Amino acid sequence: QAVLCWRFLDMGVRFLDIVKPFCAILPEIARPERKIQFRERVLWTGITLMIFLFCCQIPLFGIMSSESADPLYWLRVISASNKGTLMELGISPIITSGLIMQLLAGIQVLSVGDAPKDRALFNGAQKLFGMVITIGQASVYVMSGIYGAPSDLGAGICLLIILQLTFAGLLVLMLDELLQKGYGLGSGISLFIATNICETIIWKAFSPTTINTGRGTEFEGAIISLFHLLATRS
């Protein structure tokens, strides 16, 4: 049993060596060659968050309907996702891959040394695993009928939706890596969650769109709806 255990632990090194060629396929953010000034870091952080917010408002092309009840509504806060948009998956692939890889490294299934080369290889494997989770999660979302029955959508539209979600997942990975490499301020995951919460609060307070609640047409934004009610109440 001891021999089998050592062989099993030794698989960690071989596993990282196996995924090394595949890690080279994914784009990588190079570390800055000079010290990034505070103003530049603030600028890069702002650009990153603007891209994230922009993707949160771009609807997925090809979906039949996104007005149905959202079964993942209460999970979208911690996953920084937005239903029916490019940020449908949010940061959930990053969190999932990070938790699994850290767990495997913690129980010594994956042998990771302290050398920078080993850490870089581990981070590359984590990013590759995140992309695998992104593709798998996108496929499950499409096949489960959350955007409409796959038979009604057609194979081409289903593939197009998966590609859109995969591209968005890769973009989130790159934005998170950009901040972690020292170009921005703080952690990408924390900033994305905080930004998503702030965006939801502001939108729910000042949204000019109207909705039908059964008592007539009302503004979605609470503050705008309040002033509209005070102005029109007889």
Image: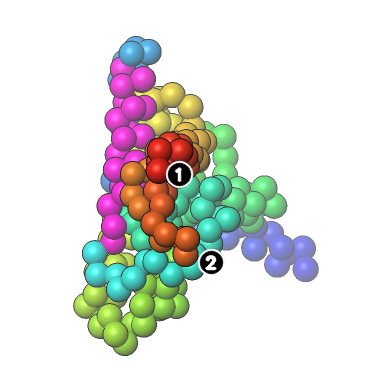
Q: Please, what secondary structure does the residue beneath circle 1 have?
A: loop
Q: Label 2 belongs to which residue?
A: 71
Q: Which residue appears at 44% of the width and 78% of the height?
A: 144
| Inter-mark Cα distance, 1 to 2 | 36 Å
Residue that lies at the very extreme toward the left in this rendered image: 156
Q: Secondary structure at mark 2?
A: loop
Magenta stretch holds residue 42? yes
Residue 168: x and y, percent?
Answer: 32, 53
Occupied quadrant, residue 196: top left
Which callout, 1 or 2, points to the residue nearer the camera?
Answer: 1
Residue 23 seen from this side: no
In the image, taking residue 44 as reference, residue 205 lies left or right, namely: right
Q: Which mark is residue 233?
A: 1
Image height check: is 13 above or below 121? below
- Binning the other alpha carbons within 10 Å of mark 2 as few (below 14), some (14 to 19) or many (20 upward) gives few
Front position in the image: 150 or 39? 150
* Residue drawn at the location 59% of the way across and 51% of the way down: 99
Give me the residue at 62% from left, 54% from top: 104
Q: Position of residue 20 (x, y in %)?
A: 39, 52
